[in-house]
Image (cartoon, rainbow, N blue to C red):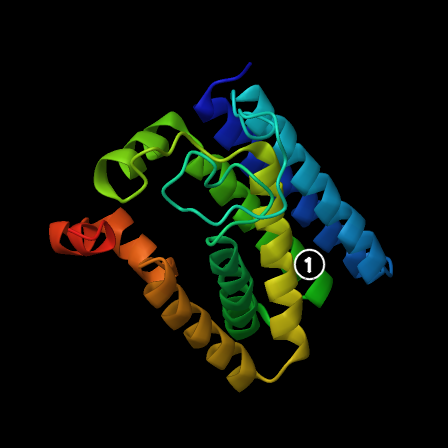
Amino acid sequence: MISDAVGLILIFGISAGTIVWRWYFGRKNKISLRTDIFIGIFIILLTALLLLLMGRLPWCACNQIWIWSGDVFSEHNSQHITDPYSPTHFIHGILFYLLLWVFARRIPIGVRLLMAIALESAWEVIENTDAVIEYYRANTISLGYYGDSVINSISDIVVMAIGFVFSWKVPTWVSVLVLVVIEVFLAFWIKDNLTLNIIMFIHPFEAIKNWQLGM
């Protein structure tokens, strides 16, 4: 077992070192996108290992693995492969692609994908630290939240990567439209989305929390 701090240091250090090595090596040798995908899988598997060592459950405590869990207020939320929050990670992918296109468009697309995977992996580790879990429980609608299962975290990273590739392949306006549609749909469906999640994480508003809880 490792502490949350050690997990954070390892995910940032190893993933950053891997990407720097890939970038430096790739400037002298031709590296295929397929190789970058394998490097991305390595980062994802590293994340899974670190989460396990940090004490996160590999899957739901119910000892079942569902493809879909739709009740955000149940003990199954964030414990199975996908859930209503999975689309927010697709949005992560869109945003990572657009931001890296603006600020790092000269970097090969494979390296940018690895950077996005590393960022998402780091967030999954941060999100599953005891401090963040307790903060979510105290300030958001995630009253029964005890951290993601490892299988859910892996799925979140994969969904992000799909969103990144989607945004790479379609016109920018399509990416923005899909992002807005997902956010609006989630707001009506579960009274939560990426925007509200960020707002409630940075500065919890009691009025928003009461609306989300139906009070």
Question: Which image quarter: residue 131?
Answer: top left
Vertical position of residue 119 compared to residue 30: above or below: above
**Percent of width and height locating residue 72:** 40, 46
Front residue of 57 and 14: 57
Q: Position of residue 153 (x, y in %)?
A: 56, 41
Establish if 172 lies above or below 2: below
The residue positioned 37% from the left and 72% from the top of the image is 184
Residue 139 appears in the figure: yes
Residue 127 coordinates in the image, percent (x, y): 43, 38
Q: Residue at x 66, y 41 (%)?
A: 44
Choose between 146 and 92: the one closer to the eye.
146
Q: Quadrant of residue 108?
A: bottom right
In the figure, 196 relative to 179: above or below? above
Q: Hey, which residue is sitting farthest left in the picture?
A: 207
Question: Where does the N terminus fall, quadrant-wise?
Answer: top right
The residue carrying mark 1 is 111
Amino acid type of disc 1? Val
Please say if 103 is above or below 4: below
Residue at figure coordinates x 51%, y 70% from the top left: 103
Pinpoint residue 33: horizontal percent, then vertical percent.
Answer: 81, 61
User: What secondary structure is found at the residue carrying circle 1?
Assistant: helix
Question: How many residues crowd mark 1 within 10 Å: few (<14), some (14–19), many (20+)?
Answer: many
For residue 144, side relative to residue 164 (left or right): left
Q: Can the viewer see residue 108?
A: no
Decide if residue 31 is on the left or right side of residue 120.
Answer: right
